[in-house]
Image: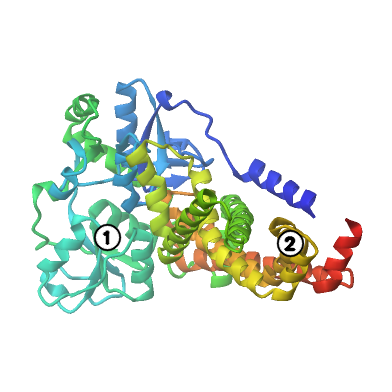
């Protein structure tokens, strides 16, 4: 069983843990979502000047990517895109994970407190996107949207513009445009505020969407509609960046944006030509199976290693917490101090969400201590210590469930605490906690989805990328849900088989087991 498990992990590491194999000084590491066409998007080939995405076999392209390429050429470097969720861009920059943010970001006063900005490389025009069959499709003024449910992306100036509409039903901001488009298509919202290039892309990609042509639009500040490159405040290369951007004329900007709109990989079509829903789901799977397979492999790798390491942590803590108090005063003090630290660890990791732990551990350690953790290793570490906190309590309960008489009998026979735990208690504990361990494994498979906040390319992250490429959100996430179910169902069945194997006649507990151990010794 151990050999098979090790072989499985080795295969997963070889197939799904992809290394970019690049030198840091050779590449300009640029952070962006790669999911906001035509500014930036993800594609499968390097055609039309696309550049590689770190840690994957995919490529990024778009207006932002081409601007990054111009800057990189000035610095004699190549562009390497670090695909990062919007809320993680500034932490990724300040922690040194990336060199620049080129992601359609506006240089607001709040952001200027944290990072520096270059000269402008594009000026955006805000507009509204509605359903094509909506009563607001022919609107020309923002005031016609009174009573409409409207939202925008979290953390951008577009969300604040909604307040200019009198009587609007302002909805909670959403994390990214994939969520917003899903909400619009499902009728949860009536409209969302966007920039004209993205709105045009949504309209061309999905006939259900319509970009509103506003004659009486939003009032904006120059700092809001200006888009610039974000850099660390101590980065002296900003002069080189400004030199490139100042030579990038407005005419060239418009020409490049038009080219990117034409090149973006969207699947346009009419409502009449749409195949049935099952066919759409099947096409998503057939056309994107490699991308989804890589994401599934990463999910399995992280959840398997996280569960194994976390269980080992739980067992070690469980043994320690049930150990008798040391007779030596110095050892007793160390034992008590370590017990306090363990309690703090358990309370913190059981009492905080994994998504917050991910941000603190991955970005926080880099910013505070200069530790540049590998993204995949960081993900495994996060899941492991989170699981360890829960498993330590499960193991403690399993140890206390063993009859106290067995401890007394072992002591009478001259067993040390370690011998008692190893030969008598832990074999029973392992069997008793198998269901709870299986439950943690299933939870870990699902909880790896929160690791997309540090840009781990797991199943949810891969599925979200496919959704933003195809604009078929419900279809794509149906595929993702099915894959998650298959994974959790399979794991549950395997663990049930292992439980039955433990329950065979060769498995003994209690006094009989103790007597057997004594005879063997």
Q: Nearer the viewer, residue 503 or 374?
A: 503
Using the image, determine if residue 78 lies above or below residue 145.
above
Q: How is the image coloured?
A: rainbow
Spatial distance from mark 2 to mark 1, Cα to Cα?
55 Å
Observer able to see residue 280:
no
Q: Nearer the viewer, residue 260 or 236?
A: 236
Label ID, residue 154: 1
Q: Counting residues from the N terminus, which is met first, the one under dot 2 or under dot 1?
A: 1
> Can you tell which mark lies on residue 420?
2
| Secondary element at image label 1 | loop
Relative to 419, is 225 on the left or the right? left
Residue under the point 33% across and 23% down: 73
**Mark 1 Cα shell of 10 Å, populated few (<14), some (14-19), many (≥20):** some
- How many numbered tags mark residues here? 2
Tell me the residue at 47%/38% (across/down).
54
Q: Is residue 302 above or below residue 445?
A: above
Q: Quadrant of the N terminus?
A: bottom right
| Quarter in which the C terminus is drawn | bottom right
Q: Position of residue 414 (x, y in %)?
A: 78, 60
Q: Position of residue 27 (x, y in %)?
A: 41, 27
The answer to which image quadrant residue 249 occupies is: top left
CB contact under 8 Å: marks 2 and 1: no
Mark 2, secondary structure of its residue: helix
């Amino acid at each position: 069983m151990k050999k098979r498990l090790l072989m499985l992990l080795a295969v997963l590491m070889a197939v799904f843990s992809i290394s970019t194999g690049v030198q840091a000084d050779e590449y300009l590491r640029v952070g962006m979502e790669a999911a906001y066409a035509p500014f930036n998007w993800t594609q499968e080939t390097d055609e039309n000047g696309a550049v590689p995405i770190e840690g994957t076999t995919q490529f990024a392209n778009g207006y932002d990517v081409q601007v990054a390429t111009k800057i990189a050429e000035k610095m004699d470097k190549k562009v390497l895109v670090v695909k990062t969720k919007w809320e993680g861009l500034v932490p990724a920059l300040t922690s040194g994970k990336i060199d620049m943010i080129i992601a359609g970001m506006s240089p607001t006063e709040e952001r200027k407190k944290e990072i520096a900005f270059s000269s402008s490389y594009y000026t955006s025009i805000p507009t509204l996107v509605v359903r094509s069959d909506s009563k607001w499709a022919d609107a020309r003024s923002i005031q016609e949207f009174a009573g409409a449910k409207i939202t925008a992306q979290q953390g951008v100036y577009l969300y604040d513009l909604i307040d200019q509409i009198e009587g609007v039903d302002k909805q909670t901001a959403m994390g990214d445009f994939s969520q917003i488009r899903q909400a619009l298509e499902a009728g949860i919202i009536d409209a969302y505020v966007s920039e004209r290039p993205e709105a045009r892309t949504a309209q061309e990609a999905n006939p259900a969407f319509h970009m509103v042509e506003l004659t009486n639009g939003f009032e904006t500040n120059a700092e809001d509609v200006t888009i610039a490159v974000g850099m660390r405040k101590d980065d002296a290369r900003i002069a080189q960046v400004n030199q490139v951007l100042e030579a990038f004329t407005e005419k060239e900007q418009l020409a490049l944006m038009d080219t990117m709109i034409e090149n973006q990989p969207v699947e346009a079509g009419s409502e009449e030509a749409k195949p049935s829903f099952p066919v759409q789901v099947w096409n998503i799977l057939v056309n994107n199976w490699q991308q989804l397979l890589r994401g599934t492999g990463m999910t399995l790798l992280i959840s398997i290693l996280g569960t194994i390491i976390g269980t080992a942590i739980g067992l070690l803590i469980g043994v320690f917490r049930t150990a008798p108090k040391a007779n030596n005063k110095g050892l007793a003090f160390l034992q008590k101090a370590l017990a306090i630290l363990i309690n703090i660890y358990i309370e913190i990791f059981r009492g905080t969400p994994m998504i917050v732990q991910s941000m603190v551990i991955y970005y926080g350690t880099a910013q505070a201590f200069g530790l540049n953790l590998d993204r995949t290793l960081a993900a495994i570490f996060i899941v492991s210590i989170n699981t360890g906190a829960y498993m330590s309590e499960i193991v403690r309960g399993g140890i206390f469930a063993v009859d106290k008489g067995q401890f007394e009998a072992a002591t009478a026979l001259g067993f040390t605490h370690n011998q008692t735990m190893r030969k008598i208690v832990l074999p029973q504990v392992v069997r008793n906690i198998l269901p709870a361990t299986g439950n943690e494994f299933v939870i870990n498979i699902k909880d790896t989805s929160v690791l997309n906040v540090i840009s781990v390319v797991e199943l949810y992250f891969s599925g979200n990328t496919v959704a933003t490429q195809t604009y078929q959100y419900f279809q794509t996430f149906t595929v993702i849900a099915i894959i998650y179910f298959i994974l959790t169902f399979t794991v549950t069945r395997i663990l049930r088989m292992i439980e039955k194997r433990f329950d065979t006649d060769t498995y003994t507990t209690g006094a009989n087991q103790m007597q057997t151990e004594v005879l063997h010794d």
